[in-house]
Image (cartoon, helix red, strand yellow):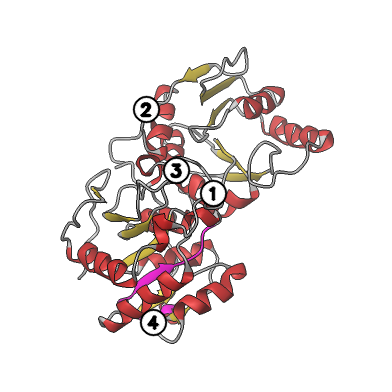
Amino acid sequence: MVRLDSTGDVLLAGPAVRAVAASSAYVAMLCGPQGAAAAEILPGVDRTIVWEAPWVGFDPPPLDPDDVRAVVGDLARLRFDRAVVLTSFHQSPLPTALLLRLAGVAAIAADCEDYPGSLVDLRHRRAPGRHEAEAALDLTRAAGFPLPPHDDGRLRVLPPPDLRHLTGPDPYVVVHPGAAVPARATGPAVLAAAVRALAGSGRRVVVTGGPAEKELTAEVAGAHALDLGGRTDLRALSAVLAAADAVVAGNTGPAHLAAAVGTPVVSLFSPVVPAERWRPFGVPHLLLGRQDAPCAASRARVCPVEGHPCLDTLTGAQIAAAVDRLTSGVPGPGGQFPPARPSTRKVSS
């Protein structure tokens, strides 16, 4: 299995990984450095191979022939029979397919719009509008790897640890303010107002973020929330999210991690990429943010519109009300997606 992108992308590949693992003796996942921690907690992955490809990422390394030869050699020594190359809808699988072919992989499957020559054996066409997780399952099914009947196809990770000593035992809502792509992040002032509104309604709030986001989480948490900025790796974060009543997050890895542990999500979704492909998958969720904003479908990394109107026009009260609707099971007025498959998680109020 190959998915060379970020944490969220790798998490969305999880159902496809399980489909392959169900009828394979051994599954390795080739991923980039940003997705490695996610690959390590996916059920069905026996080995993670980390390599930073020069054709992926926001700041890719220059092409280094020695580095390419080294990863080809590593893959060749492992003698893989088959490979499934997962990419986003706008990416080409052909550079990866060439790498795998040089490593001696005999059968390669990929979604591919470009003419693949002899690089791809199964040239699959992605159906329009498919969610990334569904599109990956479509590809593995076409490659001869259907999900077993007992698998519901939702996102999943290995069981998280018990971190009640870190979060405390009381019910809480998680607010995750960060995002790797600035255009997908809601402004800290909006999220700080949401924390105050949630706390004012009697909810306990936990704010999460990575080591580089400590200033952001401190600003958002203020005096009204438990600030866990920089205190959790991905597996620990899965535990924090799993115990939450709901998670407030943008279109970023932790939103998909919340879905993987079955927690409902208030998705602060910037329309720079389409929600139908990247919304939280398989769990109850509410979508907030102006999906008709001028930045829609631009794939911009930095908001091209003054004032970031798709997200920064939200109010703390709107976000808190969305948490209330989601945890009470009351649909919001538009913007709500049903779960992709029936949820078995009991949603508390």
**Cα gap from disc 4 to disc 3, whole angstroms:** 36 Å
Query: Which of labels 4 and 3 is toward the front?
Result: 3
Query: Which of labels 3 and 2 is toward the front?
Result: 3
Amino acid type of disc 3? Val
Q: Is residue 175 magenta?
A: yes
169 left or right of 238 in image: left
Q: Secondary structure at mark 4?
A: loop
User: Residue 58, how many percent across, how many down?
Assistant: 64, 46
The residue that mark 4 highlights is 168
Q: Secondary structure at mark 2?
A: loop
Q: Which residues are magenta?
A: 166-179
65 left or right of 279 in image: right
Quadrant containing the C terminus is bottom left
Marks 4/3 in contact by CB < 8 Å: the verdict is no
Marks 1/2 in contact by CB < 8 Å: the verdict is no
**Residue situated furthest bottom in the rendering:** 223
